[in-house]
Amino acid sequence: MAMALNPDKQALAQAEIDRVVGTERLPVIADRKNLPYLSAVIKETMRWYPVLPLSIARLTAEDDTYKGYFIPKGTIITPNVWSIAFEANEKYDPKAFIPERFLDPNDTTPDPATWAFGFGRRICPGKALAENSLMALISGILAAFDILPPAEGVVEQNFELGLVR
Ligand code: HEM
């Protein structure tokens, strides 16, 4: 959906793949380090519509104090990663799909790798597999296909809201 809604970003990612990988083979995971724009597209895809917008809840094991707030032992904490993803940003509209934000050394948008997979000891154990799989899948699709809106009609940005999406 992000690609169909943002054909200019799709074209930039495809041009990078053609330039770096060529057209004689499909991209592989090892190409990732040479595909910074594609990596930014993947980060932006994860940021733009977080799969788990409220991550997974936690229970405090001890009394704690955070920024002046006393949090008693046994409190359920909901990590609001949606608010991290959509933090106000004067340069790059958080609601817009702009991979370039992740290539801008002066931008402060947090990398989804630091919040999309949870936190601490129960962080997603599939993180590395997931990141490499996204790279293999998305690069292969973009190398071989154009993702286009239907010939008649427009793309609706109609993800369902929910705890998982
Ligand atoms: C883009 C893909 C994925 C995302 C965004 C994702 C995200 C998450 C998140 C947010 C959690 C909760 C972590 C926490 O409690 O802080 C989690 C847990 C988990 N994930 Fe993933 N995950 C992804 C892919 C995968 C894959 C590919 C696997 C396995 C091959 C996997 C296996 C697990 C398991 C087993 C847990 C439970 C860990 C525990 O509670 O100890 N995930 N994931």
Image (cartoon, rainbow, N blue to C red):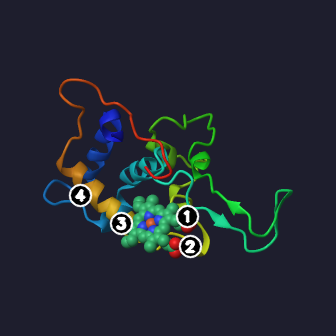
Residue at left 51%, top 35%?
95
At label 3, the amino acid type is Asn
Percent of width and height locating residue 1 = 33, 40
Q: In the rendered image, which residue does mark 1 sit on?
A: 118
| Circle 1 SS class | loop
Q: In the rendered image, which residue does mark 3 sit on?
A: 132
Mark 3 or 1, nearer chain start = 1
- Distance Cα–Cα, label 1 vs label 4: 33 Å
Image marks 1 and 2: residues in contact by CB distance under 8 Å: yes
In the image, taking residue 14 as reference, residue 145 lies left or right, namely left
At label 2, the amino acid type is Arg
Percent of width and height locating residue 50 = 48, 50
Can the viewer see residue 18? Answer: no
At label 4, the amino acid type is Val
At label 1, the amino acid type is Gly
Question: On residue 122, which mark appears?
Answer: 2
Q: Residues within 10 Å of mark 2 (few under 14, many from 20)?
A: few
